[in-house]
Amino acid sequence: MSDLTIFLYHGVSDAESPGIENFSGKHIHIDTFRDQISTAKRIGIPLSMEEVRYHVCERRPFPPRAFAVTFDDGFENNHAVAAPVLDDFDVPAMFYFSTGFVESDRMFWVDEIEDCINRSEINEIDLSSADSRLPNSFPLQSDDDRIHATIKIKGVCKEAIAADKERILAALKLETAVTPSVDAAANYRKISWAQTQELDSHPLFEIGGHSHDHNILSRLSVEGMHKDVDRCMSLLEKNLGRTITHFSYPEGRHTDYNEQVISHLKHWGIVCCPSAEDGRNDEQSDLFHLRRTMVGFMGTAFPWTV
Ligand SMILES: [Zn+2]
């Protein structure tokens, strides 16, 4: 077997989660992460994304059980918790950051939903006036109720156009009487520029872009998409003092990017941009359609065992 598995992580956590925070397992527990990296290192060959690019460009077959570790979004725990583990095992990693969230109190909309539902003291909410796809009653009595509501609202928002999503989020904040806060859980904290620079200067680690506002790039106007990518790339290059050649698409389903997005990324000198579509790759793969394997999210098991 000479294919390549690219693992897709978001966070690694050593913090207690209040209530239903992190019920989806988006932030993997540090002990689990340590086991996964230890297993992968023992039975596979770790590659940096720059080495991945080299193999594909040169059409050189990957070594048996080649793997690469990637992180999307830009949570502080990438620096504080994940990086030391990767360093211990001498495993390289790529961190793709959404620059509009670096060193900020902004929250991703999925985390806003989770936080509103988690910290609400209201027993039942009605979002039906915000969107007809949502029921007129979400009981929030138990953790199970709250998890069910969070999953349902996230699902509707994921398919909604931006204006509809904003309306649902506004209604949710009103109904739950919660203002989402990055201080509500350690896992919500974002990486700073100093931490980003520290990761970038480490020989094992690479930094790439992941848009500025984390909007789905194929859904923006061409001008809007250009503006978002331009802001992301300019900020990364300014803060890291070098050119950036790696990127990953927000959300990353095959419908979340298109040829116009790829063409604009190439204009900036991006040479490799994986999707979040599940699957493995080989040396014939296209560097702008690489597949990744999500780890930890909603119970997805680590795909490698001994
Ligand atoms: Zn993302």
Image (cartoon, rainbow, N blue to C red):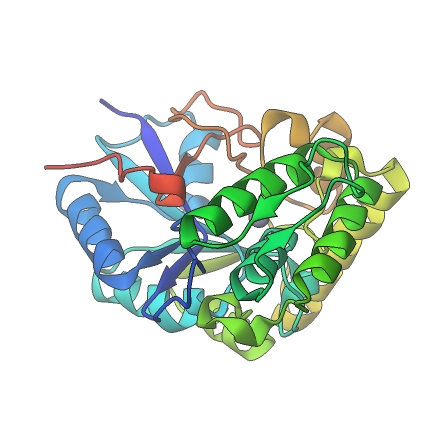
Q: Residue at x 44, y 20 (%)?
A: 284
Q: Is residue 21 visible?
A: yes
Residue 34: give x, y in percent of width and height. 22, 58
Q: Residue at x 25, y 32 (%)?
A: 63
> Which residue reaches farthest bottom?
194
Count of marks overlaid on the render: 0
Q: Is residue 219 positioned above or below 74 on the image?
A: above
For this rendering, which residue is in front, 288 or 31? Answer: 31
Residue 223: give x, y in percent of width and height. 89, 42
Q: Residue at x 53, y 41 (%)?
A: 151
Examine the image and state in which quarter residue 177 appears. bottom right
Residue 95: give x, y in percent of width and height. 49, 56
Examine the image and state in which quarter residue 112 appears. bottom right
Image quarter where the N terminus lies is: top left
Q: Is residue 34 left or right of residue 197?
A: left
Q: Is residue 249 visible?
A: no
Q: Residue at x 68, y 40 (%)?
A: 157
For this rendering, which residue is in front, 38 or 301? Answer: 301
Q: Is residue 272 left or right of residue 70?
A: right
Q: Is residue 213 positioned above or below 216 on the image?
A: below
Residue 131: give x, y in percent of width and height. 77, 37
Image quarter where the C terminus lies is: top left
Q: Is residue 282 positioned above or below 271 on the image?
A: above
For this rendering, which residue is in front, 77 or 259? Answer: 77
For this rendering, which residue is in front, 218 or 152? Answer: 152
